[in-house]
Amino acid sequence: MKKITIIGGGASGSLLAANLLRHNKDETLTINLVEKKDRIGRGVAYSTTRDCHLLNVPASKMGAFPEDVEHFYKWLQEKNYAYQPNEFVPRKIYGEYLREVVCSTIVNKAPNVQINIIDDEAVDIALDEQQAQTILKSGEILFSDQVVLAFGNFLPPDPTVENQAFAHSEKYFRNPWNSEFYEKIKADEDVLIVGTGLTMVDVVLNLHASGHRGKIYALSTRGLLPAVHQLGHVYPSFYDELQTQTRITDILKIVRRHIKKAEAEGGNWRGVIDSLRPHTQEIWRNLPDAEKRYFMQHLSRYWNAARHRMPPEAAQILAEMQSRGALEITKGRLRKIEANENGKFDVSYTADGAENQLSIDAIINSIGSQSNFRKLDAPLLVNLLASGTINTDSLRLGLDALPDGRTLNKIGSISQKIFTLGTALKGILWESTAMPEIRVQANRLALDLLEQQSN
Ligand SMILES: Cc1cc2nc3c(=O)[nH]c(=O)nc-3n(C[C@H](O)[C@H](O)[C@H](O)COP(=O)(O)OP(=O)(O)OC[C@H]3O[C@@H](n4cnc5c(N)ncnc54)[C@H](O)[C@@H]3O)c2cc1C
């Protein structure tokens, strides 16, 4: 009899459970799926209730299973949703889909499999020779052969300024994914969004949909907006030129040459970037740490803007707001945020060497999930890092692990009991946070776990 505990029931944890259910053959299997709230399947990304929050991948590519990438699109048709394969569907519908995928695998499960969905938070894991004990906040202990860390996205770090007291203010919102804060922002208030990536786009779209009249500022060190999707640009793979490259500047030269070629042939840089997707993990893994660091420091923001694109309908709204002065995207470095006695924030930032001031009513943190797990106060991470059961990767982008999800402890030993997938593998694989990668990992990890001998 095998027992597997999965910590986190967002897309990664839920799909892993679904794959365990569908792949298990003869062995008696118990799965514990631990998730804090009513988030099974939805997690952080797909719990939104807002129609304006769209997927950033077209419907025909968002299927939950690697052998059927159109599964989501077929589901939309079955449900009579009138979306085309290349459309960007509201994320709340995708959350509905993932929940249904999980529920239907549970309903159709074999009698030798049991799944317990546990509404709790895992706070620690103790290992002995035989098994892993997952300790829950309620005090309950789950005994299992293997544990999978599927904890996904954590809250962003606070913006770094001289005085961090602003972070306690009622009008500073650290969690950009919890839609409840919108009720606390009045329509005529001036808002500062820290960050100019896809989360900022979500926030602006939401304010726009609710008829916000106050000025919206969005600020980041490079002021880069996500590029806009233009579907249909395909470019042949040139991975054979990249696979032996171990220097970022050489890779960049090759990629630029192909972009020029694509454009000369009437194509587009998007096709070139997309042609790298199946190979990004291999390219990353070939790089020495110093090159990865160089990339993080000098290029990652440009890569993110080019790779994580927004749907054209979102871009149109943003452009319209920018043209009438309702939205200002600024390149600058925050220096000071002080909450004053009038209930406002005095914000200063430097841009092109000049100091600028803003008077702001509300601040929304859209910096992006904290990836340095050593800076988190989540009890599970704090305890597992303190005991050396897990370790962060050398770039502190996630956990130290093998590409297949086996984690490494503080002294570099490979764990036979603790595994991970998704965002926690970002430092090891770089491209590991979106559904096209997660569905592959969830499927493969399920097969690997089922293959391992139980105690
Ligand atoms: C706003 C947003 C939009 C996105 N849009 C897209 C998109 O359009 N397309 C795409 O492919 N990708 C998108 N992504 C990427 C996204 O990360 C993945 O698609 C996917 O949702 C990640 O799922 P996850 O389960 O790994 O993480 P999460 O969704 O973060 O789920 C992890 C879950 O673990 C739970 N958890 C954490 N710690 C514990 C604990 N100690 N005990 C119990 N439970 C715990 C949390 O409650 C959480 O629900 C988006 C990401 C974000 C943040």
Image: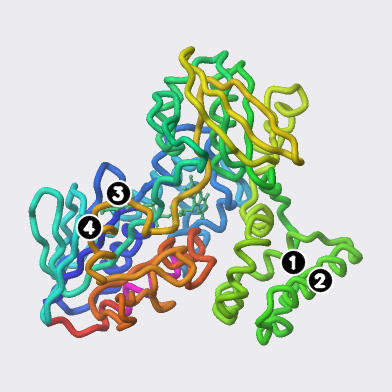
Tell me which colouring the rendered structure shows. rainbow
**How far, Cα to Cα, is label 4 from label 1?**
39 Å
Q: In the drawing, what numbered circle is on residue 272?
A: 1
Q: In the drawing, what numbered circle is on residue 33?
A: 4
Is residue 159 toward the left or the right of residue 373 in the image? right
Is residue 71 toward the left or the right of residue 349 in the image? left
Quadrant location of residue 146?
Answer: bottom left
Pointer 2 residue: 258
Q: Residue at 48%, 60% (x, y): give it.
A: 433
Q: Pointers 3 and 4 in contact (CB under 8 A)?
A: yes
In terms of sequence position, does the residue under pointer 3 or pointer 4 come before the other? Answer: 4
Q: Position of residue 186 (x, y in %)?
A: 50, 15
Which segment did they paint magenta?
Answer: 439-448
Query: Could you say whether the residue bearing mark 3 is in a helix, strand or loop?
Result: loop
**How far, Cα to Cα, is label 3 from label 4?**
9 Å
> Which amino acid type is shown beneath numbered disc 3?
Ile
**How far, Cα to Cα, is label 1 from label 3?**
36 Å
In terms of sequence position, does the residue under pointer 4 or pointer 1 come before the other? Answer: 4
In terms of sequence position, does the residue under pointer 1 or pointer 2 come before the other? Answer: 2
In terms of sequence position, does the residue under pointer 2 or pointer 4 come before the other? Answer: 4
Q: In the drawing, what numbered circle is on residue 40?
A: 3
In terms of sequence position, does the residue under pointer 2 or pointer 3 come before the other? Answer: 3
Q: Position of residue 253 (x, y in %)?
A: 79, 73
Question: Hey, which residue is sitting farthest front in the picture?
Answer: 162
Question: Hey, which residue is sitting farthest left in the picture?
Answer: 140
Quadrant location of residue 384?
Answer: bottom left
* 342 in magenta: no
Q: Pointers 1 and 2 in contact (CB under 8 A)?
A: yes
Is 99 placed above or below 208 here?
Answer: below
